[in-house]
Amino acid sequence: MSDRPENNLFALLESDTIPSARIASPNQELLVPSESGTEDLRRKALIAFLGAGMTPPPSTALLVSSLANARRSVAAHQAGGTPLDQWLEDEMHYSGIRENAAALATMELPDMRDRTASEYSRRHPDRAQQLQEILRYLRAE
């Protein structure tokens, strides 16, 4: 993995206590800024989506851990050639950050994005704004 700061969630979200935690592989750089000011907006969209439906908002460490776990699971399923549909359905039963992280990690895959977004929207119509914001950045990649 690259040591570029934009690959480090804490460098983008807020300097925190686990600087080695990564949120993106070199080919999945959700938070790479494409222009000035975009970085902060992406950070806010990421936090809003991962924390949607939770009060109080989860800590940055929990955001990082949950998204990293979901991305590892997605990568393992892809490497093993197993479909993600059942894994995602299972994760969606865990309401909260685990569900949100699984949805985001799956939506990072262009071929799964629309189907996952549609199902997430069906389950959580109250989170339409957070979903649309994160989709805007995913589609811009």
Image (cartoon, rainbow, N blue to C red):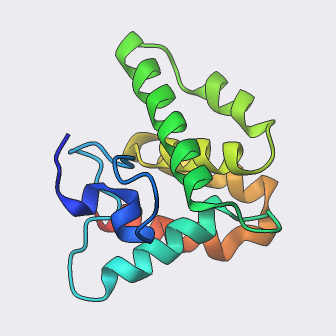
Q: Is residue 50 above or below residue 116?
A: below
As drawn, the residue found furthest toward the front would be: 17
Q: Is residue 109 above or below residue 84?
A: below
In the rendered view, does 85 fall on the left or right side of 114? right
Q: In which quarter of the image is residue 7?
A: bottom left
Residue depicted at x 45% and y 30%: 72
**How many labels were placed on the picture?**
0
Q: Residue 48, position in %: x, y? A: 61, 71
Residue depicted at x 73% and y 27%: 90
Residue depicted at x 17% and y 50%: 3
Q: In this view, does 77 lie above or below 19?
A: above
Residue 3 versus residue 116: which sits nearer the camera? 3
In the rendered view, does 73 fall on the left or right side of 137? right
Residue 48 versus residue 134: which sits nearer the camera? 48
Q: Quadrant of the N terminus?
A: top left
Q: Quadrant of residue 55?
A: bottom right
As drawn, the residue found furthest toward the top would be: 80
Q: Quadrant of the C terminus?
A: bottom left
Q: Residue 33, position in %: x, y? A: 25, 73
As drawn, the residue found furthest toward the bottom would be: 37
Q: Quadrant of residue 42?
A: bottom left
Q: Residue 103, position in %: x, y? A: 60, 46
Q: Residue 88, position in %: x, y? A: 64, 32
Residue depicted at x 40% and y 27%: 75
In the rendered view, does 104 fall on the left or right side of 93? left
In the rendered view, does 83 fall on the left or right side of 88? left
